[in-house]
Amino acid sequence: MLRLLAFTHLTVLCFRADAQAPGTADHSQWRHYGGASDSAQYSTLGQVNRSNVTKLQVAWRYSTDDNNRYSFNPLIVDRTAYVMAQNNSIVALDAATGQQIWIHSTDSKTRLITNRGINYWQSADGSDRRLLFSVDNFLQSIDARTGKLITSFGTDGKVDLRQGLGRDPDSLVLVQSLTPGRIFEDLIILGSATNQEYESGPGDIRAYDVRTGKQAWIFHTIPHPGEFGYDTWPKDAWKTVGGANAWSELTVDEKRAIVYIPVGSPKYNFYGANRKGADLFGDCLLALDARTGKRLWHFQMVHHDIWDYDPATAPKLVTVRHNGQTVDAVAQVTKQGFVFVFNRVTGEPLWPIEERPVPRSDMPGEQTWPTQPFPTQPPPFARQKFTADDLSPYIADPAERARFRDELLSARNEGLFTPPGTRNTVQMPGNNGGANWSGAAADPTNGTLYVVSKDLPAMLKLELEKNVTALPQGTPEQQGRGIYEAKCQICHHGDLKGQPPAVPSLVNIGSRLTAPQVHNVIAHGQGLMPAVPGLSQADTDRLTAYLMHTERAANIPPTDHPKDAPAPSSPETARYRSGFGFMITSTGLSPIKPPWTSLTAYDLNEGTIKWKIPLGEVPELAEKGITDTGAHFPKVGPVVTAGGLIFTGTRDRKVRALDSSTGAVLWETQVEAALEGMPAVYSVDGREYIVFCAAAQPATDLLGTPGHPATQGKSQKGAYVAFALPR
């Protein structure tokens, strides 16, 4: 039974893995997010190579002309580059000079937009060319040549993504993802970002016709009655439980018409008494027929996830030599630090995956799954434990060091799958650790996989939700403080200082954001922060008032502070919450000894590690001669080229070229701001360019994460920076 829940193998008679060539993805251009539909983050261009990379120079710059945070992966079609800048607008540039061609304002009311990339499609004869992206939960289409809205798409140019999910659309605050979908033939296939709350919508996978916007198919990730996996949930869970959504990157094997989807965790993230069972298709690698949405096979990497261990990185398509045979494979990396590798047609793992016993939960009503899958090969790329012996030598304050040591010694700490409870629980590499979006690349020609990972331990602790139905009497600011204590304090703390860089400080937020901006983040969420759940318009106004003027609510009688919610009638209706629990020192760094970020190269032919290096540095430490620490809090993606190079940026404001065979840094330079996401590699008139989006440093973004402690609070405009060899 356990084996069946983890893996389902379907015989697919129309495919033969040993008879098919690799997918037909074009790696010589950059027309898709990540370069191509196979998500390889690979380029066949080799004009820039190991021998001449030190000669790279800036070919052009284009300022974002605002202080927004961008992690956008540019698209390049022929001579045109498409980027995001100027208040979340889509901008067309001359790809050889960076000169602006046109600009399309997205008119976002909530600043909710697919800001990591967009999708490009063209008809067979090239007469119809479109860019597709989502804004404020609406899928839109514009003409790629003019930037004009295509009004024949959907209703007046828009498709409401909240429709068709089996819920009241008005109740769904968040549906769209910040990550683009995948184009296959005349379809755009989309996942979703359903936020982190009990009230989340279901994470159904959907495909839409790129010409009309009409839905072509839907796959229910929380199965409906009669569908496979329905019995792994409580009865009718699809009506109430949310999540199991693909908020990150999708991958398509174009030749076989298979879309591979890393499905995220069900909600709520850290407590699952309301969803007893294995919870298919949460935390699965899911293979669907790209034309119909029919399930071909799946593998569940976490059963009944209560750790927020959703796979965040695109599955990578590679061809390897395994047991003397050529195998077209798909590799999935995870937050836990695992690499799962499967035959991409049958779903059979290339190396055994063992179901091993894991600790049980002590929470009332919680039923953790008794085992979890562990791949026997390849070895993990991240550290999977954190004890007092692993504390960083760079915690200078003895009292702070002693506090971390005491917390670790007193916490429940039994490995990767230690269940959260009402006492502190250690999580390593953490719910924001391991591999994240854009964090892996593959050389499809030789079966090499490159993984960027971070070690960011977390300390989880569940608390019963506070009751906001009986607010203190008094001013809106005083009532807003009660709402803050009930809904926000668990992450941002009673002093509003949060846990920078992961959870930003809200102290004096009124000096950085306007009241409408604060109101908007509360209502709709932004970045890591979900929308604050269960608030009326009046409550949102009160919370905004408090955050803008905390000094007006300094004194509230203790009897008027919010209390725990009434005892639930059953564990299934209890609402426990935990902050993400990122463990951060007073200097803004991780308390575990470095490296905090690593780049690992795997030989997937043998299932072994070829090399591993720290990636990036912390400038304050590097100035003292302390190197090889890795950058802190990265979400960056490598790109591999046929020139034997790996290009990547880091949050220390540097871009680098590394030798793909050794990991040695061959070239580096500093750019305008910190970097997230991945660069794009392309050629115009025979000249190779590498363009980076250096715009991750936030200025007035409430949910931004600084590149490193020294940059906190500094206003800094970003730019797209393209490098090339001298003419």
Image (cartoon, rainbow, N blue to C red):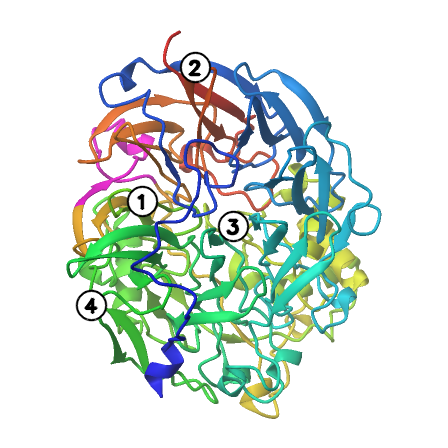
| Quarter-of-image position of residue 214 | bottom right
Residues shaded magenta: 611-631
Read off the residue under disc 4. 376
**Is residue 553 in sight in this rendering?**
no
Read off the residue under disc 2. 58
**Tag 4–tag 3 contact (CB < 8 Å):** no
Q: Indicate which disc, 2 or 4, sits on the residue closer to the N terminus.
A: 2
- The amino acid beneath tag 2 is Val
Residue at (31% x, 44% y) in the render: 444
Q: Indicate which disc, 4 or 3, sits on the residue closer to the N terminus.
A: 4
Q: Determine crowd level at label 3: few under 14, some 14-19, many 20+ residues with C-alpha closer than 10 A.
A: some
Q: Is 615 contained in the magenta span?
A: yes
Q: Position of residue 306 (x, y in %)?
A: 44, 73
Label 2 vs label 4, nearer the camera: 4
Mark sitting on residue 497: 3
The secondary structure that most of the magenta stretch takes on is loop
Q: Position of residue 368 (x, y in %)?
A: 40, 83
> Which residue occupies the foreground of this view, 450 or 653?
450
* Residue at disc 4, secondary structure: loop
Q: How far apart, in angstroms, are the residues tagged by discs 3 and 1?
A: 45 Å
Quadrant placement of the N terminus: bottom left
Read off the residue under disc 1. 444
Q: Is 721 contained in the magenta span?
A: no
> Which residue occupies the foreground of this view, 59 or 30?
30
Q: How far apart, in angstroms, are the residues tagged by discs 2 and 4?
A: 45 Å
User: In the image, is 286 to the left or to the right of 164?
Assistant: left
